[in-house]
Image: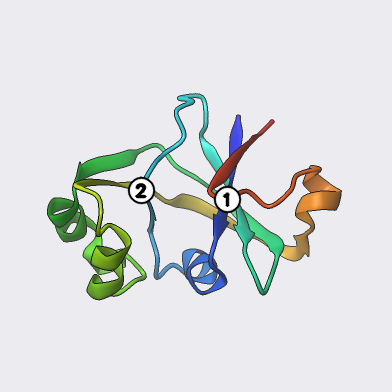
């Protein structure tokens, strides 16, 4: 089981250049069978640019989450705390085994999906 995540292009590309090793989420998918994330770079790119695997999703209080992830967060501290402003806890998907596609794919044509607000399951 895979999940497609919509990620802003500036952050999506950082996943594949290695400067962002955590993908932050306010809410997370519930299916424990998900082990791979397909990365949809949202507007203006609007293409699937790659995928990554993960074994772990961190869930903790946002101050602790920042301390654990800040070195490879790929975002500023200010952005992090604005993103989680209304939340007590946050999630961080621990990224591993990235694969950037040589040729980006179309979400509609190749995956038969519309861009998800947050995420969509994909077989």
For label 1, the crowd category at 10 Å Cα-Cα, with few meaning under 14, some 14 to 19 and many 20 or more, is few
Q: Position of residue 95 (x, y in %)?
A: 42, 51
Specify how the rendered protein is coloured: rainbow
Element assignment for label 2 = loop
Element assignment for label 1 = loop
Vertical placement of 25 versus 35: above or below? below
- Real-space Cα separation, disc 1 to disc 2, in angstroms: 13 Å
Residue at the front extreme, as displayed? 86
Label 2 sits on residue: 26
Q: Position of residue 23 (x, y in %)?
A: 41, 55
- Residue visible at 58% across and 39% down in the picture: 3
Residue in the foreground of this view, choosing between 71 and 60:
60
> Is the C-beta separation of discs 1 and 2 under 8 Å?
no
Q: Which mark is residue 117?
A: 1
Vertical placement of 48 versus 112: above or below? below
Residue in the foreground of this view, choosing between 2 and 27:
27
């Amino acid at each position: 089981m895979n999940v497609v995540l919509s990620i802003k292009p500036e952050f999506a590309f950082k996943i594949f250049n290695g400067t962002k090793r955590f993908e932050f989420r306010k809410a997370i998918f519930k299916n424990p069978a998900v082990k791979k994330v397909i990365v949809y770079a949202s507007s203006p790119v609007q293409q699937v640019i790659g995928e990554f695997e993960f074994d772990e999703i961190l869930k903790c209080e946002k101050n602790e989450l920042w301390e654990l992830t800040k070195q490879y967060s790929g975002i500023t501290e200010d952005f992090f705390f604005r993103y989680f402003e209304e939340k007590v806890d946050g999630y961080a998907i621990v990224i591993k085994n990235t694969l950037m596609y040589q040729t980006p794919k179309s979400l509609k044509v190749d995956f038969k999906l519309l861009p998800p607000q947050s995420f969509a399951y994909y077989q």
